[in-house]
Structure formats: structure tokens, C-alpha cells
Image (cartoon, helix red, strand yellow):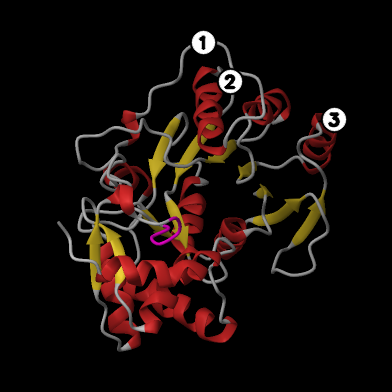
Amino acid sequence: MKALVLGGPGFIGTATCKELMRRGVETIAASRTPHPYGTFTSHLAFDRTDEAELARVLAEVEPDLLVDHAAYQPSQVEAVIRHFKGERYLFTSTGVYPDLFEDRPAREEDFKPLDGEVPAEPLEYREGKRWCETVLARSRDLPWTVIRPPAVLGAADHTLRIAAYLQRVEDGGPLLVPAESYRRQAGLAWVRDVGYAHALATDLAKPTVGRAYNVAFDGVSLEDLLLGIGRATGREVRLAPVPFAELPPDASPYGPDPRRSAGYDLSRSRRELGFEPSALEDCLAEVLAWYRAARPSHPGYAGRARELQLAGKPRQ
């Protein structure tokens, strides 16, 4: 079996390639530019937004599996529908559900295909993912599967969102958290689990065609994450709950936004994929090793003084 992974050298793509190779899948990572690092059987550099280029590569490589971490414009998915002739197309989506929930985990079936014509591009990331899923739902012949991770954390995450929390725990001051939602399940996933779920979905014996699967930690809240960091580092963690609307930008990059779902329901992923999320402690051990070696700094940490001032104000 041969897999072509679009966005393969990226954060989630690297985890996916490693999991595929562990299963003996011939894995080709693809990106726009030559990639100087990473562990892949091979790498292709081409622009997938150029439909002629995409068609050429698919015809030459003839992949059985096409894993797409990069697309978020519906025209990119439409091009795949026109040219991919393999066994399975895996599309990496995100939290594409509506914004308002009854404080419960989001289920795969909460998403409904959008109505009307596909809007003009470019689309914002989340809206684009929703339309990409809508295009897939409307397709007749493409054997597609959608993997839906929320905020993905792990070592070397280029967003540095996890570093934002590590820096604040390390400085010993209180951490601002949204009062409405910091104790409810958050939308978080370990990058290794996301790669693992993609690999599970490439099993052609599993009934995954035309279905979406949530991938996340189970039952982990923002409070759990921060207290877990405290245990792993041996530091006291002091939380300062404030209304979500009053949180300064980047004070809590993972939210959770109280208008969003309370985490993700994993029932279908467990039942049909055989997915089981890792322990938070295993994720944090790897993340902390990276953080201590790389010493990254999240840009939002520049506003730490204002956060500490807010944390010291008495609440009305």
C-alpha cells in the first residue's frame, strides 16, 4: 500500500507519516518546497493548489491512500474529487460544528452539510473546513473519511500555544482562565494521537467511508491540563478565573470558549476506528522535554504584566 501525505512534513503530517510507516505503508510526504528534515521514505515538492500539478503527481505516484492535512479551501477538495483514483481519501478537518451548544461534547453527527452554492474564495480557515466537508458530503464516488481534531498540542508545535501555559506556570504567578468553562472538557488532542487516528482510518477493512471521526483527549479540562503541568514540573499552579469576555488576548490560547462544545464525543472513533486517547501525562512528558531544550516563548507572554494586574483585582 502506498500513501501520499499532503502537508506531510508539517506538525500533524510528521506524526501521521511515522504512524503509517510503522504499519509498513510506503509513505511519501508532500509539500510546496523541498524539506530539509524529517523521517520519510521519500518527499515530493509541488504546489497542490495548482490543479494541473496535483493531477500530474497523482497520475505518476498512483497512491492508494491520499491524506490531506493542508486543504481548507473547497476548490482544493473539488480538485481531489476530479483526479484521485485510489482507495481512500483522508481529510483532516477541525471543529466545524455550529458555535452554540448545550454545554455537551460535540458529536460527529452535529455537523450538517451547508446549503447553497460554495462561496467565493479565499475562505477563513474554519469556514473553509466546513465547506470542504460539505463538498465531500455532496460527492458521489470519492471514498472519503474525515478526521476531526480540535486544538492539537505536542512537542515543536509552531503555534506555541502550549508554551504559553508552560511559561506562566514556570513564572509562578496566577494563570487567568475563563470562569465559565475552565473546569469542563476542553477541545484538546495530542499530535501523536491525531497521527495514530489517521493511520487507523487507512485500514480498508474498517467501515469508514463517508464518515467523520472525532479525535481528542477524553474528559480533560483546561484545569486538568494546568494542574497536570504543575505535577509534572513540581510547581504550584494558581488559577484566577475571570469572565471569558475579560480575558486579554493570548492569556489562555486554548480557551475554552464557553460558546463552543464541551469537548468531543469519542464513541464513534472508539467503536469503528479502535481509537483510544493517550494519557495526558504521556503527552506532557514529551512536551516538557521539548520545552526545556528549546525554550520557546509565546508572543502573548509579552502581556503578562497586565494579566498579573487583572489577577490581583478583587472580583465584583
Q: How far apart are the alpha carbons under marks 2 and 1? A: 21 Å
Say which residue label 3 marks: 52
Q: Nearer the viewer, mark 3 or mark 2?
A: 3
Q: Quadrant of residue 48?
A: top right
Among the two numbered marks 3 and 2 on one chain, the one whose residue lies closer to the N terminus: 3
Give the percent coordinates (x, y) of residue 246.
32, 52
Q: In the picture, residue 85 is in which quadrant? A: top right
How packed is label 2: few (under 14 Cα within 10 Å), some, or many (20 or more)? few
Q: Secondary structure at mark 3?
A: helix
Q: Nearer the viewer, residue 168 or 144?
A: 168
In the depicted structure, whether residue 115 falls above or below residue 26 = above
* Residue 123 in view of the camera: yes
Instruction: Tell me the residue at 55%/74% (across/down).
Output: 297
- The kind of residue tagged 3 is Ala
Identify the magenta region.
249-253
Give the answer, above or below, for where 190 lies relative to 134.
below
Query: What is the quadrant of the C terminus in the image?
Result: bottom left
Q: Amino acid at mark 2?
A: Asp
Q: Which residue is mark 1?
A: 116
Prevailing secondary structure of the magenta residues: loop
- Which residue position is annotated with label 2? 141
